[in-house]
Amino acid sequence: MRRLFGTDGIRAVAGEAPLDPKTIYAAGMAVAHQLKANAHQASIILGMDTRESSEWIAAVLTAGLLRGGAAVESAGVITTPGIAYLARHHKFTAGVVISASHNPWHDNGIKVFGGDGYKLPDETELRIEDEIFRQLESIAEPDITQLAPPVTNSTFRAGYEAFLLSAVPGLHLDDLKLVIDCANGAASAIAPELFVRLCSSAQLTHASPDGHNINADCGALHPEVVAAETKAAVADIGITFDGDADRALFACRHGRVVNGDAVLLLAARDLKARQMLNGGIVVATTMSNMGLEGALRRDMIRMLRAPVGDKYVLEMMQANHASLGGEQSGHILFPHLATTGDGLLTALVVLDIVHRSGKPLDELVADLKVFPQTILNVPVKEKKPLDEIETVAATIREAEQALDGNGRVVVRYSGTEPLARVMIEAESEETMRRHADAIAGAIREALGA
Protein backbone atom coordinates (compact mmCIF):
# COMPACT_ATOMS: atom_id res chain seq x y z
CA MET A 1 0.00 0.00 0.00
CA ARG A 2 1.31 3.45 -0.93
CA ARG A 3 2.21 5.75 1.95
CA LEU A 4 3.99 8.59 0.15
CA PHE A 5 3.40 8.46 -3.61
CA GLY A 6 -0.01 9.50 -4.89
CA THR A 7 -1.15 9.40 -8.52
CA ASP A 8 1.37 12.12 -9.35
CA GLY A 9 4.36 11.77 -7.05
CA ILE A 10 4.77 12.95 -3.45
CA ARG A 11 2.76 16.07 -2.64
CA ALA A 12 2.10 18.00 0.58
CA VAL A 13 2.45 21.37 2.27
CA ALA A 14 6.09 22.41 1.85
CA GLY A 15 7.97 21.98 5.12
CA GLU A 16 5.49 19.49 6.55
CA ALA A 17 5.78 15.71 6.34
CA PRO A 18 6.32 14.14 3.90
CA LEU A 19 7.88 17.31 2.44
CA ASP A 20 9.93 18.14 5.53
CA PRO A 21 13.72 18.44 5.04
CA LYS A 22 14.56 15.06 6.57
CA THR A 23 12.11 13.13 4.37
CA ILE A 24 13.17 15.04 1.26
CA TYR A 25 16.82 14.22 2.02
CA ALA A 26 15.92 10.56 2.49
CA ALA A 27 13.95 10.64 -0.78
CA GLY A 28 17.03 11.88 -2.62
CA MET A 29 19.13 9.05 -1.23
CA ALA A 30 16.44 6.47 -2.05
CA VAL A 31 16.00 7.68 -5.65
CA ALA A 32 19.78 7.59 -6.19
CA HIS A 33 20.04 4.04 -4.80
CA GLN A 34 16.95 2.50 -6.37
CA LEU A 35 17.37 3.93 -9.86
CA LYS A 36 21.06 3.35 -10.48
CA ALA A 37 21.72 0.88 -13.27
CA ASN A 38 23.58 -2.14 -11.94
CA ALA A 39 26.68 -0.79 -10.18
CA HIS A 40 26.82 2.41 -12.22
CA GLN A 41 26.21 5.85 -10.77
CA ALA A 42 22.74 7.30 -11.30
CA SER A 43 22.51 10.55 -13.27
CA ILE A 44 19.61 12.90 -12.50
CA ILE A 45 18.21 15.92 -14.34
CA LEU A 46 16.36 18.23 -11.95
CA GLY A 47 13.75 20.90 -12.62
CA MET A 48 11.30 22.98 -10.59
CA ASP A 49 8.34 25.32 -10.80
CA THR A 50 8.09 28.85 -9.41
CA ARG A 51 6.94 28.23 -5.82
CA GLU A 52 8.78 29.94 -3.00
CA SER A 53 9.74 26.54 -1.55
CA SER A 54 11.08 25.02 -4.76
CA GLU A 55 14.66 26.25 -4.31
CA TRP A 56 15.19 24.99 -0.77
CA ILE A 57 13.57 21.67 -1.64
CA ALA A 58 15.91 21.43 -4.65
CA ALA A 59 18.87 22.09 -2.34
CA VAL A 60 17.86 19.39 0.16
CA LEU A 61 16.90 16.86 -2.51
CA THR A 62 20.18 17.42 -4.35
CA ALA A 63 22.13 16.85 -1.14
CA GLY A 64 20.33 13.53 -0.70
CA LEU A 65 20.91 12.52 -4.31
CA LEU A 66 24.61 13.31 -4.01
CA ARG A 67 24.83 11.42 -0.70
CA GLY A 68 23.25 8.47 -2.49
CA GLY A 69 25.97 8.61 -5.13
CA ALA A 70 24.07 10.26 -7.98
CA ALA A 71 25.32 12.96 -10.33
CA VAL A 72 22.89 15.90 -10.60
CA GLU A 73 22.28 18.46 -13.34
CA SER A 74 19.70 21.25 -13.12
CA ALA A 75 17.48 22.77 -15.78
CA GLY A 76 16.19 25.34 -13.28
CA VAL A 77 12.60 26.52 -13.71
CA ILE A 78 11.06 24.34 -16.40
CA THR A 79 7.84 22.47 -17.09
CA THR A 80 7.26 18.92 -15.88
CA PRO A 81 7.12 17.51 -19.45
CA GLY A 82 10.33 19.42 -20.16
CA ILE A 83 12.12 17.25 -17.60
CA ALA A 84 10.55 14.07 -19.02
CA TYR A 85 11.87 15.05 -22.46
CA LEU A 86 15.35 15.93 -21.19
CA ALA A 87 15.67 12.71 -19.18
CA ARG A 88 15.01 10.65 -22.27
CA HIS A 89 16.84 12.79 -24.82
CA HIS A 90 20.04 13.08 -22.78
CA LYS A 91 19.88 9.52 -21.43
CA PHE A 92 19.74 10.44 -17.75
CA THR A 93 18.89 7.67 -15.32
CA ALA A 94 15.93 9.74 -14.13
CA GLY A 95 14.31 13.15 -14.21
CA VAL A 96 12.97 14.75 -11.03
CA VAL A 97 10.56 17.69 -10.91
CA ILE A 98 9.81 19.78 -7.85
CA SER A 99 6.23 20.92 -8.36
CA ALA A 100 2.71 20.60 -6.99
CA SER A 101 1.13 21.26 -10.38
CA HIS A 102 -2.27 22.93 -9.90
CA ASN A 103 -2.09 23.10 -6.07
CA PRO A 104 -1.75 26.44 -4.20
CA TRP A 105 1.69 28.00 -3.67
CA HIS A 106 2.19 26.67 -0.14
CA ASP A 107 2.08 23.07 -1.41
CA ASN A 108 4.88 21.40 -3.33
CA GLY A 109 5.82 17.97 -4.57
CA ILE A 110 8.38 15.61 -6.04
CA LYS A 111 7.70 13.79 -9.32
CA VAL A 112 10.09 11.23 -10.76
CA PHE A 113 10.44 10.07 -14.36
CA GLY A 114 12.51 7.16 -15.52
CA GLY A 115 15.24 7.51 -18.11
CA ASP A 116 12.68 6.53 -20.74
CA GLY A 117 10.67 9.70 -20.04
CA TYR A 118 7.73 7.87 -18.45
CA LYS A 119 6.49 8.04 -14.88
CA LEU A 120 7.87 5.29 -12.68
CA PRO A 121 6.10 1.93 -12.41
CA ASP A 122 4.22 1.35 -9.16
CA GLU A 123 6.68 -1.30 -7.98
CA THR A 124 9.62 1.12 -8.37
CA GLU A 125 7.80 3.82 -6.41
CA LEU A 126 7.09 1.29 -3.66
CA ARG A 127 10.77 0.33 -3.48
CA ILE A 128 11.70 4.00 -3.15
CA GLU A 129 9.08 4.44 -0.43
CA ASP A 130 10.42 1.47 1.53
CA GLU A 131 13.95 2.84 1.43
CA ILE A 132 12.81 6.32 2.45
CA PHE A 133 11.32 4.90 5.64
CA ARG A 134 14.46 2.86 6.29
CA GLN A 135 16.69 5.91 5.83
CA LEU A 136 14.53 8.01 8.16
CA GLU A 137 15.42 5.68 11.02
CA SER A 138 19.14 6.46 10.79
CA ILE A 139 19.86 9.78 9.07
CA ALA A 140 20.12 13.15 10.81
CA GLU A 141 18.03 16.23 10.02
CA PRO A 142 19.88 18.23 7.31
CA ASP A 143 20.77 21.86 7.98
CA ILE A 144 19.06 23.61 5.07
CA THR A 145 20.92 26.85 5.77
CA GLN A 146 24.11 25.10 4.67
CA LEU A 147 22.69 23.76 1.40
CA ALA A 148 22.25 25.36 -2.01
CA PRO A 149 20.38 24.20 -5.13
CA PRO A 150 22.52 23.03 -8.06
CA VAL A 151 23.61 25.61 -10.62
CA THR A 152 21.18 25.91 -13.52
CA ASN A 153 22.43 24.93 -16.96
CA SER A 154 20.40 27.08 -19.38
CA THR A 155 21.21 24.89 -22.38
CA PHE A 156 18.71 22.29 -21.13
CA ARG A 157 15.75 24.67 -21.31
CA ALA A 158 16.91 25.91 -24.72
CA GLY A 159 17.04 22.30 -25.92
CA TYR A 160 13.50 21.65 -24.75
CA GLU A 161 12.26 24.79 -26.55
CA ALA A 162 13.98 23.57 -29.72
CA PHE A 163 12.19 20.23 -29.37
CA LEU A 164 8.79 21.97 -29.09
CA LEU A 165 9.43 23.94 -32.26
CA SER A 166 10.57 20.82 -34.13
CA ALA A 167 7.54 18.78 -33.00
CA VAL A 168 5.22 20.91 -35.14
CA PRO A 169 7.49 21.98 -38.02
CA GLY A 170 6.67 24.92 -40.24
CA LEU A 171 4.17 26.40 -37.80
CA HIS A 172 3.56 30.11 -38.42
CA LEU A 173 0.82 31.92 -36.52
CA ASP A 174 1.03 35.51 -37.75
CA ASP A 175 -2.56 35.20 -38.96
CA LEU A 176 -3.77 34.55 -35.38
CA LYS A 177 -4.06 36.80 -32.35
CA LEU A 178 -3.42 34.88 -29.11
CA VAL A 179 -3.86 35.44 -25.39
CA ILE A 180 -1.65 33.17 -23.27
CA ASP A 181 -2.07 32.71 -19.50
CA CYS A 182 1.07 31.23 -17.93
CA ALA A 183 -0.48 30.76 -14.44
CA ASN A 184 2.60 32.48 -12.94
CA GLY A 185 4.11 29.01 -13.13
CA ALA A 186 6.74 27.09 -15.06
CA ALA A 187 5.33 28.16 -18.43
CA SER A 188 6.40 31.72 -17.55
CA ALA A 189 10.00 30.67 -18.22
CA ILE A 190 9.30 29.32 -21.72
CA ALA A 191 6.03 30.53 -23.25
CA PRO A 192 7.03 34.20 -23.75
CA GLU A 193 10.03 33.35 -25.92
CA LEU A 194 8.32 30.40 -27.64
CA PHE A 195 5.20 32.22 -28.76
CA VAL A 196 6.96 35.46 -29.69
CA ARG A 197 8.94 33.38 -32.19
CA LEU A 198 5.76 31.93 -33.67
CA CYS A 199 3.25 34.75 -33.51
CA SER A 200 3.60 38.51 -33.94
CA SER A 201 0.41 39.09 -31.96
CA ALA A 202 0.66 37.15 -28.69
CA GLN A 203 -0.52 38.75 -25.44
CA LEU A 204 1.09 37.13 -22.39
CA THR A 205 -0.70 37.28 -19.03
CA HIS A 206 0.12 35.98 -15.53
CA ALA A 207 3.75 35.51 -16.48
CA SER A 208 5.32 37.29 -13.49
CA PRO A 209 5.81 34.68 -10.75
CA ASP A 210 6.70 35.90 -7.26
CA GLY A 211 6.74 32.57 -5.42
CA HIS A 212 3.23 33.02 -4.03
CA ASN A 213 1.02 33.72 -7.06
CA ILE A 214 1.28 30.41 -8.95
CA ASN A 215 -2.26 29.28 -9.96
CA ALA A 216 -3.76 32.20 -7.99
CA ASP A 217 -6.96 33.25 -9.79
CA CYS A 218 -5.40 32.36 -13.13
CA GLY A 219 -4.24 29.43 -15.21
CA ALA A 220 -6.00 26.17 -16.03
CA LEU A 221 -7.80 26.15 -12.66
CA HIS A 222 -9.59 29.31 -13.76
CA PRO A 223 -10.04 29.01 -17.55
CA GLU A 224 -12.83 31.58 -17.43
CA VAL A 225 -10.11 34.20 -16.84
CA VAL A 226 -8.34 33.64 -20.15
CA ALA A 227 -11.74 33.24 -21.84
CA ALA A 228 -12.76 36.74 -20.71
CA GLU A 229 -9.34 38.14 -21.66
CA THR A 230 -9.57 36.54 -25.11
CA LYS A 231 -12.96 38.10 -25.80
CA ALA A 232 -11.88 41.50 -24.46
CA ALA A 233 -8.74 41.49 -26.62
CA VAL A 234 -10.75 40.45 -29.72
CA ALA A 235 -8.29 37.57 -30.03
CA ASP A 236 -8.74 34.35 -31.98
CA ILE A 237 -7.67 31.87 -29.31
CA GLY A 238 -6.79 31.90 -25.61
CA ILE A 239 -4.47 29.34 -24.03
CA THR A 240 -4.03 28.67 -20.32
CA PHE A 241 -1.66 26.34 -18.48
CA ASP A 242 -1.47 24.94 -14.95
CA GLY A 243 1.47 25.50 -12.60
CA ASP A 244 3.81 22.93 -14.15
CA ALA A 245 2.34 23.25 -17.67
CA ASP A 246 1.64 19.57 -18.23
CA ARG A 247 -1.86 20.49 -19.37
CA ALA A 248 -3.56 23.24 -21.33
CA LEU A 249 -7.09 24.55 -21.79
CA PHE A 250 -8.30 26.95 -24.46
CA ALA A 251 -10.80 29.70 -25.15
CA CYS A 252 -12.48 30.58 -28.44
CA ARG A 253 -12.93 34.07 -29.91
CA HIS A 254 -16.37 34.37 -28.30
CA GLY A 255 -14.96 33.93 -24.78
CA ARG A 256 -16.06 30.34 -24.25
CA VAL A 257 -13.85 27.72 -22.60
CA VAL A 258 -12.66 24.85 -24.80
CA ASN A 259 -11.70 21.97 -22.50
CA GLY A 260 -9.78 18.73 -22.90
CA ASP A 261 -12.79 16.84 -24.24
CA ALA A 262 -13.04 19.30 -27.13
CA VAL A 263 -9.29 19.04 -27.75
CA LEU A 264 -9.58 15.24 -27.93
CA LEU A 265 -12.37 15.57 -30.51
CA LEU A 266 -10.39 18.09 -32.56
CA ALA A 267 -7.19 16.02 -32.47
CA ALA A 268 -8.98 12.71 -33.13
CA ARG A 269 -10.57 14.05 -36.29
CA ASP A 270 -7.27 15.46 -37.50
CA LEU A 271 -5.35 12.25 -36.82
CA LYS A 272 -8.04 10.15 -38.48
CA ALA A 273 -8.02 12.37 -41.58
CA ARG A 274 -4.26 11.84 -41.80
CA GLN A 275 -4.61 8.08 -41.17
CA MET A 276 -2.71 8.36 -37.88
CA LEU A 277 -5.48 7.38 -35.43
CA ASN A 278 -4.48 3.81 -34.57
CA GLY A 279 -7.44 1.46 -34.47
CA GLY A 280 -9.87 4.36 -34.61
CA ILE A 281 -9.54 4.59 -30.78
CA VAL A 282 -9.35 7.48 -28.34
CA VAL A 283 -8.71 6.91 -24.63
CA ALA A 284 -10.46 9.35 -22.28
CA THR A 285 -11.38 8.99 -18.59
CA THR A 286 -14.43 8.42 -16.44
CA MET A 287 -14.75 12.22 -16.16
CA SER A 288 -15.08 12.89 -19.90
CA ASN A 289 -18.54 14.00 -20.97
CA MET A 290 -21.01 11.67 -22.66
CA GLY A 291 -21.22 14.29 -25.40
CA LEU A 292 -17.63 13.54 -26.43
CA GLU A 293 -18.42 9.85 -26.72
CA GLY A 294 -21.39 10.64 -28.96
CA ALA A 295 -19.46 13.05 -31.21
CA LEU A 296 -16.64 10.55 -31.68
CA ARG A 297 -19.14 7.78 -32.41
CA ARG A 298 -20.63 9.87 -35.23
CA ASP A 299 -17.15 9.94 -36.77
CA MET A 300 -16.80 6.16 -36.34
CA ILE A 301 -14.24 6.61 -33.56
CA ARG A 302 -14.45 4.44 -30.45
CA MET A 303 -13.81 5.95 -27.02
CA LEU A 304 -12.39 3.93 -24.13
CA ARG A 305 -12.52 5.18 -20.53
CA ALA A 306 -9.59 4.87 -18.11
CA PRO A 307 -9.50 5.84 -14.43
CA VAL A 308 -8.66 9.49 -13.79
CA GLY A 309 -4.93 10.26 -14.03
CA ASP A 310 -2.75 10.59 -17.12
CA LYS A 311 -0.72 7.64 -15.83
CA TYR A 312 -3.78 5.39 -16.19
CA VAL A 313 -4.74 6.90 -19.53
CA LEU A 314 -1.27 6.06 -20.82
CA GLU A 315 -1.51 2.48 -19.53
CA MET A 316 -4.79 1.93 -21.40
CA MET A 317 -3.37 3.60 -24.51
CA GLN A 318 -0.37 1.29 -24.50
CA ALA A 319 -2.56 -1.77 -23.97
CA ASN A 320 -4.68 -0.79 -27.00
CA HIS A 321 -1.90 0.75 -29.14
CA ALA A 322 -3.86 4.02 -29.17
CA SER A 323 -2.31 7.15 -30.66
CA LEU A 324 -4.41 9.67 -28.72
CA GLY A 325 -5.68 9.96 -25.17
CA GLY A 326 -6.29 12.49 -22.47
CA GLU A 327 -8.40 14.07 -19.80
CA GLN A 328 -11.12 16.68 -19.69
CA SER A 329 -8.78 18.73 -17.48
CA GLY A 330 -6.40 19.28 -20.40
CA HIS A 331 -3.81 16.48 -20.06
CA ILE A 332 -3.50 15.30 -23.67
CA LEU A 333 -1.17 12.49 -24.72
CA PHE A 334 0.36 12.32 -28.20
CA PRO A 335 2.68 9.29 -27.93
CA HIS A 336 4.13 9.86 -31.41
CA LEU A 337 5.45 13.20 -30.10
CA ALA A 338 6.09 12.86 -26.36
CA THR A 339 6.01 10.42 -23.46
CA THR A 340 3.77 12.50 -21.19
CA GLY A 341 1.12 15.20 -21.27
CA ASP A 342 2.64 18.53 -22.29
CA GLY A 343 0.57 21.72 -22.21
CA LEU A 344 2.92 23.69 -24.47
CA LEU A 345 3.04 20.86 -27.00
CA THR A 346 -0.76 20.50 -26.88
CA ALA A 347 -1.09 24.22 -27.54
CA LEU A 348 1.15 23.99 -30.61
CA VAL A 349 -0.75 20.96 -31.95
CA VAL A 350 -4.12 22.70 -31.54
CA LEU A 351 -2.83 25.90 -33.14
CA ASP A 352 -1.44 23.88 -36.04
CA ILE A 353 -4.81 22.19 -36.62
CA VAL A 354 -6.62 25.54 -36.53
CA HIS A 355 -4.05 27.11 -38.86
CA ARG A 356 -4.24 24.27 -41.41
CA SER A 357 -8.04 24.17 -41.34
CA GLY A 358 -8.48 27.89 -41.91
CA LYS A 359 -11.47 27.76 -39.55
CA PRO A 360 -12.00 29.30 -36.09
CA LEU A 361 -11.55 26.98 -33.11
CA ASP A 362 -15.22 27.22 -32.09
CA GLU A 363 -16.41 26.09 -35.53
CA LEU A 364 -14.17 23.03 -35.45
CA VAL A 365 -15.84 21.71 -32.28
CA ALA A 366 -19.29 23.26 -32.70
CA ASP A 367 -21.05 19.88 -32.87
CA LEU A 368 -19.80 18.79 -29.42
CA LYS A 369 -23.06 18.86 -27.50
CA VAL A 370 -22.27 18.27 -23.85
CA PHE A 371 -24.56 16.89 -21.19
CA PRO A 372 -24.92 19.20 -18.17
CA GLN A 373 -22.08 18.18 -15.87
CA THR A 374 -20.91 19.28 -12.45
CA ILE A 375 -17.96 18.30 -10.29
CA LEU A 376 -18.17 19.00 -6.56
CA ASN A 377 -15.05 18.79 -4.39
CA VAL A 378 -15.74 17.74 -0.80
CA PRO A 379 -12.88 18.10 1.75
CA VAL A 380 -12.50 14.88 3.75
CA LYS A 381 -10.60 13.95 6.90
CA GLU A 382 -9.86 10.41 5.68
CA LYS A 383 -10.26 8.36 2.52
CA LYS A 384 -12.34 5.44 3.72
CA PRO A 385 -13.71 3.21 0.92
CA LEU A 386 -17.00 4.82 -0.10
CA ASP A 387 -18.79 1.51 -0.57
CA GLU A 388 -18.17 0.80 3.13
CA ILE A 389 -20.17 3.90 4.16
CA GLU A 390 -23.79 2.84 3.80
CA THR A 391 -25.30 6.34 3.70
CA VAL A 392 -22.95 7.35 0.89
CA ALA A 393 -23.32 4.08 -1.03
CA ALA A 394 -27.12 4.27 -0.80
CA THR A 395 -27.20 7.85 -2.09
CA ILE A 396 -24.99 6.90 -5.04
CA ARG A 397 -27.22 3.91 -5.85
CA GLU A 398 -30.30 6.11 -5.73
CA ALA A 399 -28.77 8.57 -8.22
CA GLU A 400 -27.70 5.78 -10.60
CA GLN A 401 -31.15 4.21 -10.54
CA ALA A 402 -32.87 7.55 -11.12
CA LEU A 403 -30.66 8.43 -14.08
CA ASP A 404 -31.20 4.95 -15.59
CA GLY A 405 -28.57 5.30 -18.32
CA ASN A 406 -29.45 8.90 -19.18
CA GLY A 407 -26.53 10.28 -17.24
CA ARG A 408 -23.51 9.21 -15.22
CA VAL A 409 -22.33 9.17 -11.62
CA VAL A 410 -18.60 9.12 -10.82
CA VAL A 411 -17.49 9.50 -7.20
CA ARG A 412 -13.81 9.12 -6.34
CA TYR A 413 -11.08 10.45 -4.11
CA SER A 414 -8.49 12.87 -5.45
CA GLY A 415 -5.08 11.26 -5.81
CA THR A 416 -3.28 14.47 -4.84
CA GLU A 417 -5.51 16.28 -2.31
CA PRO A 418 -7.75 15.37 0.69
CA LEU A 419 -10.89 15.63 -1.41
CA ALA A 420 -13.75 13.47 -2.61
CA ARG A 421 -14.85 14.42 -6.12
CA VAL A 422 -18.51 14.01 -7.08
CA MET A 423 -19.22 14.16 -10.82
CA ILE A 424 -22.78 13.98 -12.16
CA GLU A 425 -24.01 14.18 -15.74
CA ALA A 426 -27.71 14.35 -16.49
CA GLU A 427 -30.08 15.51 -19.20
CA SER A 428 -31.26 18.45 -17.09
CA GLU A 429 -29.46 20.97 -14.89
CA GLU A 430 -31.96 20.46 -12.05
CA THR A 431 -31.50 16.67 -11.97
CA MET A 432 -27.72 17.04 -12.10
CA ARG A 433 -27.62 19.50 -9.19
CA ARG A 434 -30.04 17.52 -7.04
CA HIS A 435 -28.07 14.27 -7.20
CA ALA A 436 -24.67 15.97 -6.89
CA ASP A 437 -25.75 17.89 -3.79
CA ALA A 438 -27.25 14.76 -2.21
CA ILE A 439 -24.08 12.69 -2.67
CA ALA A 440 -21.79 15.52 -1.59
CA GLY A 441 -23.96 16.03 1.49
CA ALA A 442 -23.76 12.35 2.44
CA ILE A 443 -19.94 12.39 2.11
CA ARG A 444 -19.69 15.61 4.09
CA GLU A 445 -21.81 14.14 6.87
CA ALA A 446 -19.73 10.97 7.07
CA LEU A 447 -16.20 12.18 6.33
CA GLY A 448 -16.20 15.95 6.21
CA ALA A 449 -13.01 17.69 7.30
Image (cartoon, rainbow, N blue to C red):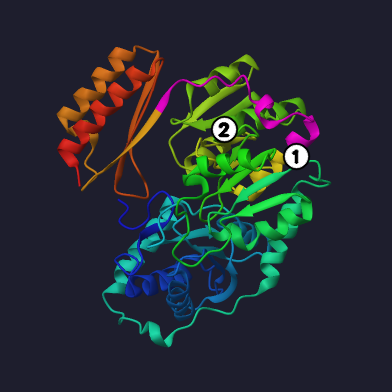
Q: Residue at x 46, y 69 (%)?
A: 54
User: Could you classify mark 2 by the number of other residues whose Cα lies within 10 Å: few (under 14), some (14-19), or many (20 or more)?
Assistant: some
Which quadrant would residue 53 be assigned to in this image?
bottom left
Asked whether 356 falls inside the magenta stretch, the response is yes
Specify the label residue 155 is tagged with: none
Would residue 104 be found to the left or right of residue 165 on screen? Answer: left
Residue closest to the eye, 433 or 143: 433
**Amino acid at the residue labelled 2:** Arg
Mark 1: secondary structure: helix
Q: Position of residue 292 (x, y in %)?
A: 54, 23
**Residue 83 in view:** no
Which quadrant would residue 84 be assigned to in this image?
bottom right
Q: Is 297 drawn above or below residue 264 in the view shown?
A: above
User: What residue would you read off at disc 1?
Assistant: 352
Q: Residue at x 41, y 15 (%)?
A: 427
Q: Residue at x 44, y 69 (%)?
A: 52
Residue closest to the eye, 381 or 44: 381
Mark 2: secondary structure: loop
* Residues under numbered marks 1 and 2 in contact, where contact means CB atoms less than 8 Å apart: no
Residue closest to the eye, 323 or 349: 349
**Amino acid at the residue labelled 1:** Asp
Would residue 79 be found to the left or right of residue 392 on screen? Answer: right
Q: Position of residue 327 (x, y in %)?
A: 51, 37
Which segment is the magenta one?
A: 352-373
Asked whether 155 falls inside the magenta stretch, the response is no
In front: label 1 or label 2 = 2
CA–CA distance in space, label 1 to label 2: 20 Å
Looking at the image, is mark 1 or mark 2 earlier in the sequence?
2
User: What residue would you read off at disc 2?
Assistant: 256
